[in-house]
Image: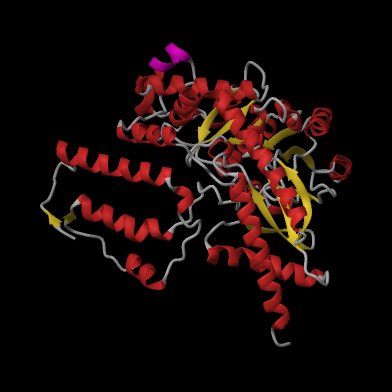
Amino acid sequence: MRKMPPREQIKLDGDEMRAMGYRIIDMLVDYTGAQAQFPVTRALDQVTFDEILSEPMPEAGSSWEDVLEQFERQVLTTIDHLDHPRFFAYIPSSSNFVSVMADTLASGYNIFNSLYPLGTGAAIVERLCIRWLCKLCGMPEGAGGVFVSGGSVANLSGLAVARQVLLNGDMRDAVIYASDQAHFVIARGLRILGFAPEQLREIPSDEDFRLPVADLERAIAEDKAAGKRPFCVAATAGTTNTGAVDPLPQLADLCEREGLWLHVDGAYGASACVTEHRKMELAGIERAHSLTWDAHKWMFQPVECSALLVQDRHWLSATFKDTAHFLSDADAHSQEEVGEEMNFMYQGIQLTRYFRALKFWMSVKVFGMAAMRQAIERGFKLAELAESLLRKSGSWEIVTPAQLAIVTFQYKPADGDEALANRITDELSGAMAANGFAFASTTKLGDKTVMRMCTNNPRTTDADLRQTITIMSRLGANLEKQLLDAPAG
């Protein structure tokens, strides 16, 4: 790389900034227009891996052209594309260009969105976006929330609010309930908050992989009789494995009777609230005391863009507000203006906060909710099409039908051998990654290893699905032949 003289002010000149900016914009536009032409997955060879890791921290600077070239050569060639129309693994993040530019503005202007006087416009925009989300899911007028990085922090924060409001911080003998399909971030968040592992009681899910209310009710009664303190149910609106939605109305009734907190992890599933025809599948979500919602999943935002919503916005400051002398002047001024609800440093974990709401606000303003609604509806229809194609192919057993844009299935060997079916299915995601055309992931449902496809990218075509399932069927058949032909032992 060409070495550059020291830039003591840590800045480029105007011409360099324009040239670098235009080059990056060209790269992004070219990529956005041609995503489907890229392989979905990229293999990282050991030589490149070692080359990246062995680089010492540079003492002298280099030209931005050389650094950008290294980024293209060593970084872009070694990542999977979660926004690719044939990336069906996990919960894809399809992003959109308007939000990408919004992130550029938020970073370029270095907007600090924690204290109202220091970022008034940013605070107003975030408050507006939170109100939009609360209204979409039917939360009451006094509801509030805060943008955070992702579901991990949103769930952690929601559980922290539950601990403060219902337990006043006293965790002794407290019990939290969730199904065995709850995301692992629930258990991790509770551990971070100081709960012991045994304070999370995992309830086996029913045949539809939902939290069974009768079993939960029995568990609560048992724990009360043993002198414990049930205080929270962590439900899921759209499990990662199958897209199942826990029975929210019945859970809300139970929590109301028992005086428990209802936390709902709606990381990707809550976006169904946007639609006219599918939101009924989330009936009862408006009764959650706390709700997580990842806009970077099914609201088409780039990572990171998640929200925690609560029924009473004052619960946030009751949980997270602390004071500091060095903020007293600005704090006093902001209290006179707006109270606490737009001082977002009091609404969550972070003091230094990025302006995440800008990308959500700008993309909704540019595209409109009608387009967002249609794009979410398309995710449902694509999963239903995938299920239909899988059934017709004859190579697959549908394990859970399409729901909330997820369908799960298992390869069906000619002899019906379940152990062989599990093994072929388990190896199939690796074969897909090596092929590069499309990618789907595996998971476990009971004793079955299954493939799962999440079809929430609005730029996925029907042809993408047809070709993917054709290739998957061929790869499955190849694996079946290899395993059957392999010598015993």
Q: Residue at x 56, y 20 (%)?
A: 131
Is 463 covered by the magenta stretch?
no
Q: Does residue 423 appear left or right of residue 133 in this picture?
A: right
**Left or right: 62, with 290 as reference point:** left
The image quadrant where one finds the N terminus is bottom left
Q: Residue at x 45, y 19 (%)?
A: 124
Predominant secondary structure, magenta span: helix
The image quarter in which residue 439 lies:
bottom right
Tell me if residue 319 comes above or below residue 241 in the rendering.
above
Q: Is residue 231 above or below residue 77?
A: above
> From this viewpoint, is residue 406 visible?
yes
Membership of 337 in magenta stretch: yes
Residue 347: horizontal and vertical position, in percent? 52, 28
| Location of residue 56 in the rendering, given as x and y in whole percent from the top left corner | 26, 65
Question: Is residue 77 or residue 391 the one in the foreground?
Answer: 391
| In this view, 156 is above or below 470 | above
Indicate the position of residue 486 as horizontal and vertical percent values: 69, 84
Q: Can residue 341 be seen? A: no
Query: Who is closer to the viewer here, 57 or 388?
Result: 388
Range covered by the magenta-colored residues: 333-338
- For the C terminus, the image quarter is bottom right
